[in-house]
Image (cartoon, rainbow, N blue to C red):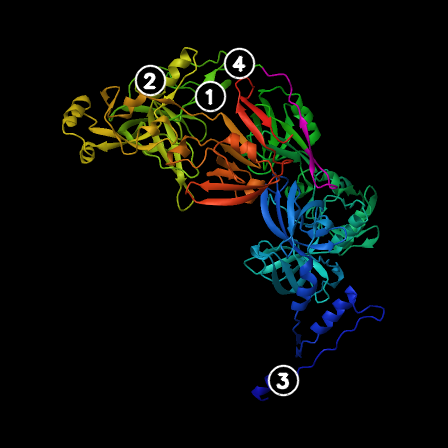
Amino acid sequence: MDDDSRFQTHTPVPLRQARPPENATADSELGSKRSLFAQLMKTPRIGRHRSLDLGALVAESAVNAIVTIRFCQTVAFDTTSAVASEASGFVVDKERGIILTNRHVACAGPFVGEAVFQNREQVNVHTIYRDPIHDFGFLKYSPSDVKYYDVHELPLDPSRAKLGTEIRIIGNDAGEELSILAGQISRIDRNAPDFGPMTYNDFNTFYLQAAASSSGGSSGSPVIDIHGSAIALQAAGRNEGATDFFLPLDRVKRALELVQAGKPVDRGDIQVQFHVAETVLPEGPGDIAGLVTGDVLVSINERIVTKFADLDEILDNSIGKQVRTVIERDGDRVEHMIEVQDVNSITPDRFVEMGGAVLHNLSYQLARYYCVQATGVFVAQVWGMLPLEDAGEGVVIRSVDGHETPTLDDFIQVIRRIPDRTRVPVVYYSLNDIHEETSGHWTDMNIYTRSDDTGVWECETVDPPSEVCQVEQQTARFATSANPNCADYHSVADSGPLLHAMDDQCIPKLLGKTPVRTAQLATKGNSEGDQLMLHAYNDGKGLASIRAMVSTVGPMTITKHSPPRFRSINADWFKLDTRAAQKYNTGVLTDMDGVVSGMWVSYIDDMDDEGTNNEYFYGLDVCKILPVLEPLRRDEHPKLRTLGVELSTISLVEARHLGLDRSWIGRIEDVSPHHRQLLMISRIVCGSRCSDVLNPLDVVLTVDGKVATQFADFDRAFSAPSLTLQVLRHKQVVEWSGAILHEPHTAVRQQCRQLPSRTYVSYNAYGSPAYTAGMAPTSFVTHVEDMETPDLDAFLSTAKSSFVCVRIVGLDKIPSVISVKLNTHYWPTVELVKDSSRPNGWNRIHYDS
């Protein structure tokens, strides 16, 4: 055979034009679509491969149904943290204003969002249905809100999803407002993608697969064929293999028809993951009936089940009834009668927010993934009153104060009976059962319940108990150490710590007759060569003692942080000569006679380029705490003051270059022969009184007429009103649209030459309007609309509109303008004012009620 015979030539043959049915008018929607497809079919055919130009279809039919969805989930809920993002969706009922998108876009928790049409017209949307299992949901908008756009709708036709079907995916791919990706269906029976633990995973359904190379933002995009119908819903993809996964529309179409008819979407289940029973949830209907892992489903109600769509149909129509299920186990046919459960009964539709923690009933999603009983109270967000960070992900509370809490209602009833400040045991589990005690102040406890009619989660506030727990005095023996001043750890009652403004000290005030021996404290600092003992707890919480020597004494400079936070300044620190000390974050240092001479502390610096925190370990002389400790011993509240400057050391040579007169050299040598240095002002707290009279690079020569060469020479400033300013303590904090605003704290002022405003943003919550708009932490609010906001009072008086134009300035002095869309239902405006008469020290003032 000649080599050229391998190549075949084909003459292009035009395809026939498809004609509309006789009963269709020329200007009807169906007729115009088919006429359009007829023109598409004129594309030449080469061999067996047909190239279809879907561009006209996209332009005239599908695009007008596509929307970009900008949304946020306002709080952590189920498998999703609070988040703000963008995705896609498409109109499936333009008369009722119904949009189809993914469940992970419609959100399992509180949803706030808007749909943006291709002409950039925006309308508010809310969730009217999210499927408890499969990855789809419906959003609703008011059709009357669309003024200037001809909205189209896409019909759903799941029957057209077949192998080899050429498709187009149209949506908000990679943040683009409109992107059209081509592909071809390569599988119609792929398992649902598994995204790992603690995230949403679909199951009990097949997925379609194609190579289309979509990316973030394409979730919720329609998958259309040449007939202009949506045959699947874009759900996920794998970047490594340029593979996309689509949800079939069988159950989506049924749910849409029920929603359009105003009927509830009933969903049945037996708490088993099929086809082969991979997961049988304990105490679920399948487990109670006798199903076990590995059972192969054969039939239900004498109907052979080979497709998940058939399984869903049978179960959805049998809620509350028993179904005759035949399975194959070890080659034998076994029959079971199983009662079908309503999945909505094990799908959380409300949550409790208390002290920053978010709790709700454990969802079927999480219970199925971890194969645990679908009961218990799930902690979606660990915070505040429930400090369970060490338990890992997926904390489920089993009991509180000895009372079982299988449901959220049980949890609420138990919590409402617990007095403020009571320390109670909380039993919970994650991967392993862990027992824990927790205590804290009562805060506002709000119960949010979902309403699919309005899309709003209605709020009910639970009043805290009027009773306050009186701390019970208890005694216990200590495990003693060879050192008379050291012993094993013991829990003591605490009426609130006192925080030092500059040296990172925290001194708890003990209550009752806790059996603690008073330690003898050194009155002078440590020097190089001193022999000390370091007493600290090791990883096993055992007490360890290490002998070490003071190697160096001198100032330590901790670099500025971003965002700004506390930095210890103006103190001499010392290092030890043993590397073993670096294993311990904290500890107590004593001399060889057991006198406490210092504290072993650690500081964390900013992350390096590899994302690792730099940690420093130093010793701090115990005499530094005496200005705080002595008033406490007299039952007085310490009144600490600070000069409002950050100091650094310079040599006498450097001071001479700065203009220091020669006569000062002798005076300095006479006063401090071991510290031939001076102190220079490196930074001044912005807005302090010192900022009016002192400048950076000023060299300090005397303090109260005495030569100052050490940081200790400034310790007298703590009690000398003529030299110092009292530490600025925040008296006012504002929560607004998910952002926390207050006056700039000391660390911020140290990094600013001039404050743009005294309205400082220190935090914004994920999923909040402030986060969505880009109201970044470490920025200053200078204007709201056209009104200046020099302080919080001015801000509160102006930031009241539903849409607020805010001007902000960052630490880099670069200004920007953002538009914040307020949502006072989930993110109210609250002012917290310092009030010592309140149990927790703060008074909450609500502005939106």
First in sequence: mark 4 or mark 3? Answer: 3
User: In the image, is residue 125 part of the stretch drawn in magenta?
Assistant: no
Q: Which residue is mark 2?
A: 720
Q: Where is residue 55, by image quadrant?
A: bottom right
Q: Are marks 1 and 3 in contact (CB under 8 Å)?
A: no
First in sequence: mark 1 or mark 2? Answer: 1
Q: Where does the image place residue 145, in percent across and percent down from the top left?
A: 70, 49
> Which residue does the image show at 18% across and 25% down from the upper left?
668
Q: Which residues are magenta?
A: 448-469
Q: Which mark is drawn over residue 497?
A: 1
Q: Whole-Å distance between the Cαs marked 3 and 2?
A: 100 Å
Q: Is residue 332 above or below residue 640?
A: below
Q: Amino acid at mark 3?
A: Thr
Give left or right: position of 637 versus 32: left
Q: Which mark is drawn over residue 474?
A: 4
Q: Amino acid at mark 2?
A: Ala
Furthest-front residue in view? 786
Q: Nearer the viewer, residue 237 or 716?
A: 716
Q: Nearer the viewer, residue 207 or 611?
A: 611
First in sequence: mark 3 or mark 2? Answer: 3
Quadrant of image for the C terminus: top right
Q: Whole-Å distance between the Cαs marked 4 and 3?
A: 96 Å
Q: Is residue 213 above or below residue 41?
A: above
Instruction: Assess disc 4: are there few (<14), some (14-19) or many (≥20) residues with their C-alpha within 10 Å of its C-alpha.
Output: few
Give left or right: position of 515 versus 123: left
Q: Which residue is mark 3?
A: 9
Q: Where is residue 244, by image quadrant?
A: bottom right
